[in-house]
Amino acid sequence: MNDEQLIADLHSRWVFGWERNEGDAPFDFRRTFDGFYDFSSPDVRLYDDFDPEQRVATTAAYGSIWEPTFHRMVSAHHAVHDGPHVIAGHDLAVSTLTFVARITVPDGTTDIRTTTSLVWRRTPDGWRIVREHNSTKALPAGDLDGMLPGHEAP
């Protein structure tokens, strides 16, 4: 497998790391994504506009900001809509993909489309995320009906 294929596989697996099913164990960002992010890099920059506070994190510990949100979720189901598209050099690579998700909380359901761009650095432990930018758009209710295999509208 070449670097482009490896990064494409990692980015796709990253998307499904956010998957949640009713009754899952509490979400633990570090446990789920330890093999994806560079937790020791001093120059990490991570941003996701789905974060209500619009924070730019400078460490991979930013993942803990998602734990309260994910703890109250009933489920989160994803599908890759486009990509991943990868450019890989010797020590850095970038991947972009678009995913859709249906997020269910006790008081309702939200469908989203997110474009995500990740910059990966080759480390002694393998490729790790050092930059992340996610842009999310809420979709009209029911927009994803039939797009998430096995997960229809509530």
Image (cartoon, helix red, strand yellow):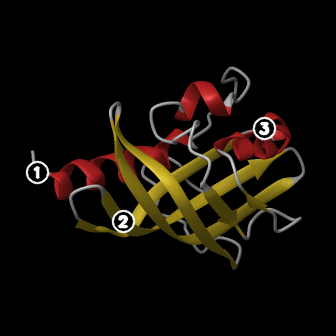
Instruction: Say whether disc 1 or disc 2 marks the residue closer to the N-terminus.
Output: 1
Query: Is residue 76 shown to the viewer in this render?
Result: yes
Query: Is residue 154 shown to the viewer in this render?
Result: no
Instruction: Say whether disc 2 or disc 3 marks the residue closer to the N-terminus.
Output: 3
Q: Nearer the viewer, residue 112 or 68?
A: 68
Residue at x 73% of width, y 46% of height: 62
Residue 32: mark in rendering: none
Q: Amino acid at mark 3?
A: Glu
Q: CA distance from mark 2 to mark 3?
A: 25 Å
Q: Is residue 118 left or right of residue 41?
A: left
Secondary element at tag 1: loop
Secondary element at tag 3: helix
Rendered image quadrant of residue 13:
top left
Q: CA distance from mark 1 to mark 2?
A: 14 Å
Q: Amino acid at mark 2?
A: Ser
Decide: is 137 above or below 112.
Answer: below
Residue at x 64% of width, y 44% of height: 60
Label 3 environment density (alpha carbons within 10 Å; few <14, some 14–19, many ≥20)? some
Residue at x 53% of width, y 65% of height: 100
Residue 95: mark in rendering: 2
Residue at x 85% of width, y 39% of height: 68
Q: Amino acid at mark 1?
A: Asn
Instruction: Say whether disc 3 or disc 1 marks the residue closer to the N-terminus.
Output: 1
The x and y percentages for residue 151 are: 53, 49
Furthest residue to the left?
Answer: 1
Secondary element at tag 2: strand
The x and y percentages for residue 33 are: 54, 35
Label 1 environment density (alpha carbons within 10 Å; few <14, some 14–19, many ≥20)? few
Residue where numbered disc 1 is placed: 2
Residue 67: mark in rendering: 3
